[in-house]
Image: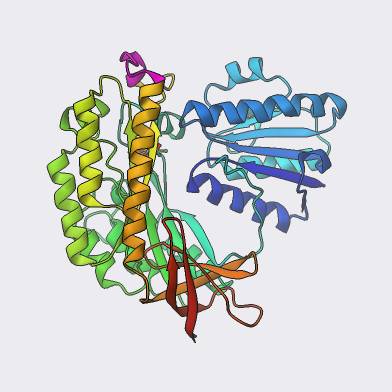
Amino acid sequence: MKYYLWTIGCQMNFADSRQVAEELDLLGFLQASRAEEADLILLNTCVVRQSAEDKVVGRLTSLQGLKRRRPGLRLALMGCFVGETEALRGRYPWVDAFIAPSDIDSVVAFALQAAAGESRTGGDELPGDGSSAAPAHSATPVAAGVPISYGCDHFCTYCIVRLRRGPEVSRPVAEIAAQVQDLAGRGVREVTLLGQNVDSYGHDLPPLAPGQDPPNLADLLEAVHPAVGLARIRFLTSHPADMTGRLIDTAARLPKVCEHIELPVQSGDDAVLRRMGRGYAVAQYRELVAQIRAAMPGAGLATDVIVGFPGETEAQFEATYRLLQDLRFDMVHVAAYSPRHGTPAEHLPDDVPADEKERRRRAVDDSQERIVGEINAGLLGTTVEVLVEDRHRGKWRGRTRTNKLVFFGLDGAGRQGELVQVRITHTGPWSLQAEPVQSLP
Ligand code: SAM
Ligand code: SF4
């Protein structure tokens, strides 16, 4: 039986899709590269903004005809599009199952039922109960995402993710450490520990020993660090209200933990942050960045920003713009505010006109392109370590510890997974060109 897996959204969705692909491949399912060739179609979805939701709806609509022509085709939808199942069933009757985000077991059960030729079923009847769309491939990757927690305990007023994914549930330390060792044993050299808010990891877990505090992300980093064969560890996404000095120190001290932090600020204005329900002030955020940079000089720092949040004045936007100019991030994911049904911010007047939101978004993007272009230019002639991930247009492609994309020529096949020292020969805002200095074991 052939399956087609389409994924959109955050790294968590891509990690989930990889796991689905791995489990289905083990069960003997074959991957199809086009929906038209498949007997089973799985859409792993995102609704964080209207634009993502529109892509999912477009995809669903285009599959309606296929399903009509081939009634035996089985179609399941997972990810954050899946809210109230009854309403979705009414709107998209050609979908056979709606499965909650990250509920891999139900996806596998659905696939097995489809393979067994079972009749139509809904997700809640199953056991257990950019566009960056791309099929997941289950061959062992060089770098893999490992979910460490699901859901989120924050209540950011604009965010639908926590409504769809529920409260935070952390996976036990031992389970994650075993998974990381297993991945490393199979050739994975880099893991990214994933969660909506990795900095609050573990607060819902029992202590590892009587009388201790519950484990936290620093403990988890210590636990996965010894994995034999593993070269690098990253973690994302961090939350400024939950990041601790101990985490920063641990990340800085452990050699495999990369100097790369994703710390969304969302706005550079305290009143907007309060309306967003973020739980920190700009001064605290600046202090955290200073602490990270002191502990990890040259760290690659990324942030997320929403422009045009309800009531955001020109002066408040400019405060965000200035903060980004001051802090000079390596990456800024900027989005225009998009009202999401069911969130508290839905009831605030969406009063920044669409073209003004777009102007603010572009202003941030343009300024960021300049800033990162300058940061990267400073790397010209330096030697950096790159983990080789794959080949792209005749060059090897990999990332620095600070998460910069590097292309370079290097003889020989099978270089994937090698750590290579390269000298940067050309820089641009989005990638670096380099020449190898030497290969490391
Ligand atoms: N948990 C992370 C955090 O604390 O920021 C990120 C989760 S969210 C899935 C990823 C990003 O999407 C957010 O950082 C935010 O910038 C953006 N986002 C979320 N809701 C949005 C909305 N309603 N409109 C525009 N952007 C949004
Ligand atoms: Fe959403 Fe806020 Fe949780 Fe991030 S921290 S997932 S933005 S509620």
Residue 364 in the image, given as x and y percentages of width and height: 33, 39
Return the x and y of residue 126 as percentages of the image width and height: 65, 34
Q: Quadrant of residue 66?
A: top right
Seen in the image, is 208 located left or right of residue 438? Answer: left
420 and 17: which is toward the camera: 420
Residue 208 visible (yes or no): no
Q: Is residue 351 magenta?
A: yes
Please give left or right for residue 354 compared with residue 133 in the image. Answer: left
Q: Position of residue 209 (x, y in %)?
A: 27, 61
Relative to residue 131, is residue 178 depicted above or below? below
Relative to residue 165, is residue 50 depicted above or below? above
Residue 233 forms part of the magenta stretch = no
Query: Which color scheme does this rendered protein use?
Result: rainbow
Q: Residue at x 33, y 14 (%)?
A: 347
Write the start and end of the magenta stretch as one range: 345-354
Residue 68 left/right relative to 56: right
Q: Nearer the viewer, residue 154 or 384?
A: 384
Q: Quadrant of ligand 2?
A: top left
| Residue at left offset 84%, top offset 37% | 117
The answer to whether any part of residue 147 appears in the image is yes
> Residue at position x 60%, y 53% from top?
18
Image coords of residue 222 (percent x, y): 32, 68
Relative to 101, does residue 425 appear above or below in the rendering?
Answer: below
Of residues 89 and 369, the one nearer the viewer is 369
What is the residue that sits farthest to the right in this orientation?
69
Main SS type for the magenta part? loop
